[in-house]
Structure formats: C-alpha cells, structure tokens
Amino acid sequence: MKQFTRFEGVVAPLDRANVDTDLIIPKQFLKSIKRTGFGVNLFDELRYLDEGYPGQDCSKRPLNPDFVLNQPRYQNAEVLLARRNFGCGSSREHAPWALEDFGFRAVIAPSFADIFYNNAFKNGLLLIELDEDTVERLFKAVEATEGYALDVDLENQQMITPEGERIAFTVDAFRKQCLLEGLDDIGITLKDEDAIREFEADHRARRPWLFRDSA
C-alpha cells in the first residue's frame, strides 16, 4: 500500500445520499481480485449510457454527459464529495479499489457505512467525516468555483480551502498511522518479521518431530 502524503486535489461533487457499493462498482466486475483495473468501471451505470461488462473497451462506450465525473471541470479529481451513508450495501472490497484506481485519494461525506469505512482505510483511501452543514458549504463552493481544490493534510488532520479556511477532521490514530506509513494488514504483520522468524526457528528446534518428512 502506498504511503499517504499531503496533497492538493480537485474536488468532484457526487450529490446523492446512500450511494451503495453496487453503484460504486457493479457486481459483474467482481470476478477479478487483482485490485487494479477497476477505475474505468467506477460508477459504471452512471458514467456510461450502455451496459458494461468485464473486459470491455470502455474508451469506445457512450458517456453520460450529465454525470459529474464526465464533465471536463472535474477531470483528474482526487477528492470525492458525497452525501450521508456513502458506501452502504454489500461489503465488496472492490469498491475502494475502484475509487483508488480511478484516482481518488480521499472521500468526504457526513457518514459512511461501517464495512466500507474499514475496507477503504485498509486499501489506502482516506475517508473524512464532516457535519452536514460543512459538507453543504463545500458543495456550494465546488459548484461555484471551477477547479476548486482542497489541500488535504492528514498529518495535522485538516483541509485547507482555496480561501485559506482550515477545516479540521478526526481520524483514528491507528488508521492514520497506517496510511502515513503505507501499511496494510500484511505490512503491519511484517513489521514483526524478525520476531516471527525467531519464533519459527525456536518452534522448529523445540519440536523437530513436527517437521519430519512423513515419507
């Protein structure tokens, strides 16, 4: 997992509540477990005017001109702004994979579904919960200003608006450290690699009969 560093990214507004994981990445794309290549099918039912299927050349598909991510002003956006209960529905890990693969590094919303929240942090995606009034203010600012970007500073747990306003956010200390160090569950375990090797060597020495070749 990549380390999460401070960045300034354009904000794309997805003005709907209860966005479920099937809308984020439809079920027909769940066959692969590579973690990459899902970005072209992010919000597939909203982005395209035809039905998507795995292995399709998305560059030739008809785009929905009314969908926010197809609008030129939101190209290369790295921050997604949404409404409450983002990521509800099934527990598919493909949802944060698709968001990250598309290029999003952070999602802002008043609330997130629990399982999606955990999966996102485990895959390097920062989720920021803000009160609904602040989220509403951001929606209005983003829509009023083309190229509206936020300076996202995880280390100091704040975002800085183009006007210089500092918006503080909270994040669990453990999850924060994992993002800053780029550690997923495997990476956390491997921090104790020397201790693990020492245990395995001692275990083999103390119980050699467990490791004899039965043949």
Image: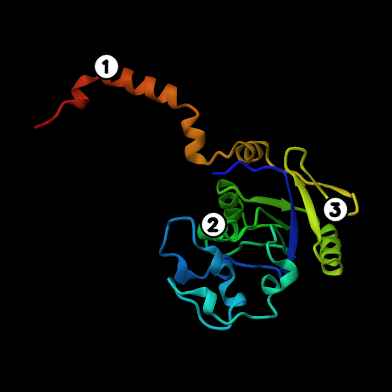
Asked whether, in this view, residue 135 is left or right of residue 193, the answer is right
Q: CA distance from mark 3 to mark 2?
A: 27 Å
* Mark 2 residue type: Trp
The mark found on residue 205 in the picture is 1
Disc nearest the viewer among 2 and 1: 2
The N terminus: image quadrant:
top right
Please provide percent x and percent y for residue 58: 52, 74
Furthest residue toward left: 215
Amino acid marked by disc 1:
Ala
Which residue is depicted at the point 84% across and 57% down? 134
Q: Tell me which label, 2 or 1, sits earlier in the chain.
A: 2
Q: CA distance from mark 1 to mark 3?
A: 60 Å
Judging depth in this view, the residue of 153 and 168 nearest the camera is 153
| 119 to the left or right of 206 | right
Residue linked to disc 2: 97
Q: Position of residue 172 (x, y in %)?
A: 68, 40
When asked about the image quadrant of residue 83, the answer is bottom right
Q: How many marks?
A: 3
User: Which percent across, then down, holds residue 77?
Assistant: 70, 61
Does the rendering let one see residue 15?
A: no
Give the residue at mark 3.
161
User: Residue 120: which numbered mark, if any?
Assistant: none
Q: Which of the image's four quarters has the C terminus?
A: top left
Q: In the visual, does 166 lie left or right of 127?
A: right
